[in-house]
Image (spheres, rainbow, N blue to C red):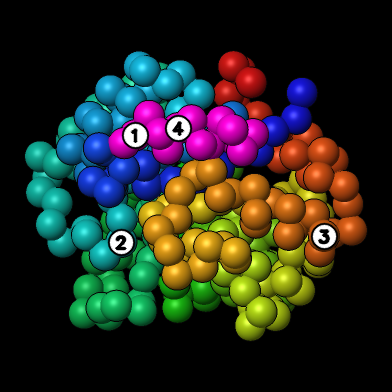
Amino acid sequence: MSYWIDSHAHMTEECYQEEFDVYMQRALDANVKKTLVICLNFEELERAFVLKAQYPFLDIAVGFYPGDVPKFSEEDWKRLEEVAKDERVIAIGEIGLDYYWDKSFVELQKECFIRQIELANKVQKPILIHSRDAAQDTYDILAAYKAEYGALLHCYSGSVEMAKRFEKLGLYFSFAGPLTFKNSKESKEVVKALPLNRLFVETDCPYLTPVPHRGKQNETAYVHYTGEYLAELKELDVETVQQQMIKNYKNLFKVKDM
C-alpha cells in the first residue's frame, strides 16, 4: 500500500480545532495516512497527545523553536527532558537556528540547539531542524555535535552545494509548498540533485500552502500537491515516490505501525 506522509504539520494550531475531524477526513481522502505533528511548547504537546488518542496515525515531535528559546526556564528544560522520553514522541523538533527575524540572541540559539541535539541523543531519537538564514552555523553545529539517531532539515531552502554538504552528514531533507512556486528555481535544483532516499514532503501547515491553493490556509491534506510535483521533478511515478518516502520515514523515525 502506498500513501502520502506529511512530515511536518502544526495541527495543534487554533485554526484547526473547531473542525479538526473535517481536516483529518480530508487528509485521509487525499491518501495522507501519516502526519507528524510538531509541538513547540507543552500546551501544544498536551493537545497532540489528546489528538493522537483519537487518531493513531498522528505522530508527535516536540522541541523548543529557535525564536522562542528566551522564553524557556530551567524548569521548562527539565520538563522537556521528561516528555522527550515519552514513547509517543518520536523526534525532538523543530529545533535549530533562525537569523531572519531576530539576531539579538544568536549565541543563545546555538546553545539551545546543541542542548537539544544532546537531549535527542540521550533519548535515542532523531531531530527536526529549522534553519533560516543560518545554513553555515547549522552545518558547523551538526558537524561538531552529531545527531546520532538521524536528522531532518525541515522545509529546506538552501543551495545545492550546501545540500550536498548536509547530505554527507547523513541528513534527510523535507520540502513544503514553496517547491511548487514558479520562482523556487533553487529548491527544484536541490530536489533533482538529491537521492530520493533522503527526501520527504511536508505542509508546515497552516503555512506555506502549495499551488493551487497558494495564499489560502494550508492543511495536511495538501501535502499531495508537493509530493506529486516532486515526483514530476524526479521523473518518477507517484507510487515510487510514496513507497520510498514510507521507507525513509521508517528508517529515520523507527515507526513500526505503517
The quadrant holding residue 4 is: top right
The quadrant holding residue 23 is: top left
The span shown in magenta is 19-32
- Whether residue 237 is in magenta: the answer is no
Q: CA separation, marks 3 and 2?
A: 33 Å
Q: Are marks 1 and 4 in contact (CB under 8 Å)?
A: yes
Q: Which residue is mark 1?
A: 20
Tell me which amino acid carries mark 1.
Phe
Q: Nearer the viewer, residue 123 or 86?
A: 86
> Which residue is painted at 22% across and 58% down in the image?
69
- Among numbered discs 2 and 1, the one appearing first in the sequence: 1
Q: Is residue 225 above or below residue 159?
A: above
Quadrant housing the C terminus: top right
Q: Which residue is mark 3?
A: 232
Measured as percent of width and height from the top left, residue 180 is found at 65, 68
Secondary structure under tag 1 reads: helix
The quadrant holding residue 2 is: top right
